[in-house]
Amino acid sequence: MQFKPIEQSFAVNFNYSLHFTNEVFGSSNSLFAEIIKSYKPNNQVKLLFVIDDGVLRNHSYLLENIKSYCLNYSKQLIFTESLLIPGGEAAKNNYDNVNSIIGAIDKNAICRHSFIVVIGGGAVIDMAGYAASIAHRGVKLIRIPTTVLSQNDAAIGVKNGINAHGKKNFIGTFATPYAVINDQKFLTTLEQRDWIAGVAEAIKVALIKDKSFFTEIKKNAVLLKERNMEAMLHSIYRCAEMHMDHIAQNGDPFENGSSRPLDFGHWSAHKLEQMSNYTMRHGEAVAKGMAIDLTYACILEYISSDVLDEILGVLINIGFDLSIPVSGNKEMNELLNGIEEFREHLGGELTITMINEIGQKFDIHEINLELMTDAINSLNKKFKINAA
Ligand SMILES: NC(=O)c1ccc[n+]([C@@H]2O[C@H](COP(=O)([O-])OP(=O)(O)OC[C@H]3O[C@@H](n4cnc5c(N)ncnc54)[C@H](O)[C@@H]3O)[C@@H](O)[C@H]2O)c1
Ligand SMILES: [Zn+2]
């Protein structure tokens, strides 16, 4: 008996919105309740909150506000429990955090018709998103990002994950949120390094896609550095819009191919974060990573030294340190191993995004390690660090 294959094919539409507000759990702000109502207009919905402890430390009223908000909108909302998670990369380095969310999902009988609401930086959001996506094969998630980087990049896309085997994002899922809410109030309490870190992702997306956005960031560099909220909100909006547009329009939202332009400058960024034992912020590492690849691009004459200096100047004006913390051949080789790790994570042919002018990207499939070493050393010479 011979059976011919049964072909299977179906398409699923993914939709979610990114909202912008101020004081999301303020008593007169109905946005959150309306979002939940859009899911179940006539029923109550259970909510399990996961909160970054760095956020709660700086916004000590938050938990009380959430509880009274849920009481206020009790026709829609049922508060079950809130879990506090240590903020920063530690959230993604410890599997216990995933287990504690899954345990709370079980304890509070959170089902696929309930919501996890995660409030925090990109790390807590990545971790909680992963836990939500595997419990019951996917519990609904609302992300409320609280850093610049999470509001303009980490929380608005389709990727969730944690670190394992000494590698960033080694374990993770592609799963879309139900909604994302950017609340500007949270940004006011960021440390300066977290205030600027996210700007690196805005510069990244501008460099690969939109020269006019880069020009705007260049013009506003000092305002951004000096915590001008209007300039920052504008940059967050445009950056988020471009990331979301790329995910939807580029034909590869779940990264089946080998090209990943939004990871410009990221092969070394991920490695530098890991080599620093995660004391370096993702955005700080992305600024260094872009500086490395841009210097390499200049050595190979893809871009002129004027363009290189213009871009490095903007990064410096915003407040980034562009020195690369490698001393000696061993560390240099470890950093360069990031190229192969980057390839392996995505699979297939090595594909690194480069630019040949501001706003214009292209892919390369080979890296000359000697010239890359020269690029890193020349950056360190420029920024006065002992070269390897
Ligand atoms: N999933 C994705 O597509 C994606 C994209 C880019 C980056 N990421 C990930 O995002 C993470 C970085 O996120 P991040 O830059 O938001 O940093 P982070 O999450 O590491 O947070 C940095 C620090 O800020 C604190 N914090 C958060 N909100 C605060 C607030 N409002 N006030 C004061 N302190 C606050 C945190 O407690 C933490 O100590 C990395 O793990 C990176 O890999 C994911
Ligand atoms: Zn990034």
Image (tube, grey):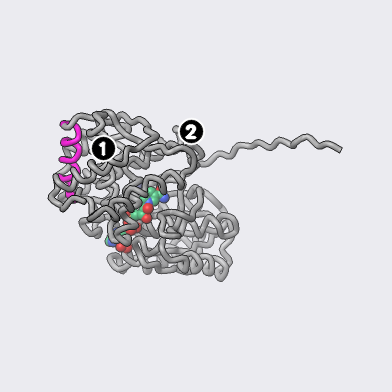
For the point 30% across and 65% down, the residue is: 59
Residue 307 shown left or right of residue 39 in the figure: left
Residue 93 locus on image (x, y percent): 41, 63
Ligand 1, seen in the image, is in the quarter at bottom left
Residue 18 locus on image (x, y percent): 40, 45
Q: Quadrant of residue 213?
A: top left
Quick check: is 317 in the magenta stretch? yes
Q: Residue 332 carries which label?
A: none
Q: Main secondary structure of the magenta part?
A: helix
Name the residue nearer the viewer: 75 or 40: 40
Q: Give the range drawn in magenta.
A: 306-321
Name the residue nearer the viewer: 65 or 126: 126
Residue to which mark 2 is pinned: 251
Name the residue nearer the viewer: 34 or 335: 335
Above or below, 309 relative to 28: above
Residue 65 locus on image (x, y percent): 36, 65
Q: Quadrant of residue 297?
A: top left
Q: Earlier in the sequence, mark 1 or mark 2?
A: 2
Q: What residue type is labelled 2?
A: Gly
Residue 89 locus on image (x, y percent): 36, 61
SS label for mark 1:
helix
Mark 1 vs mark 2, CA separation in Å: 29 Å
Quick check: is 145 in the magenta stretch? no
Q: Residue at the bottom extreme?
A: 107
Residue to which mark 1 is pinned: 296
Q: Is residue 324 visible?
A: yes
For the point 53% across and 50% down, the residue is: 39
For the point 34% across and 45% down, the residue is: 266
For the point 87% across and 38% down, the residue is: 1
SS label for mark 2:
loop
Q: Quadrant of residue 168?
A: bottom left
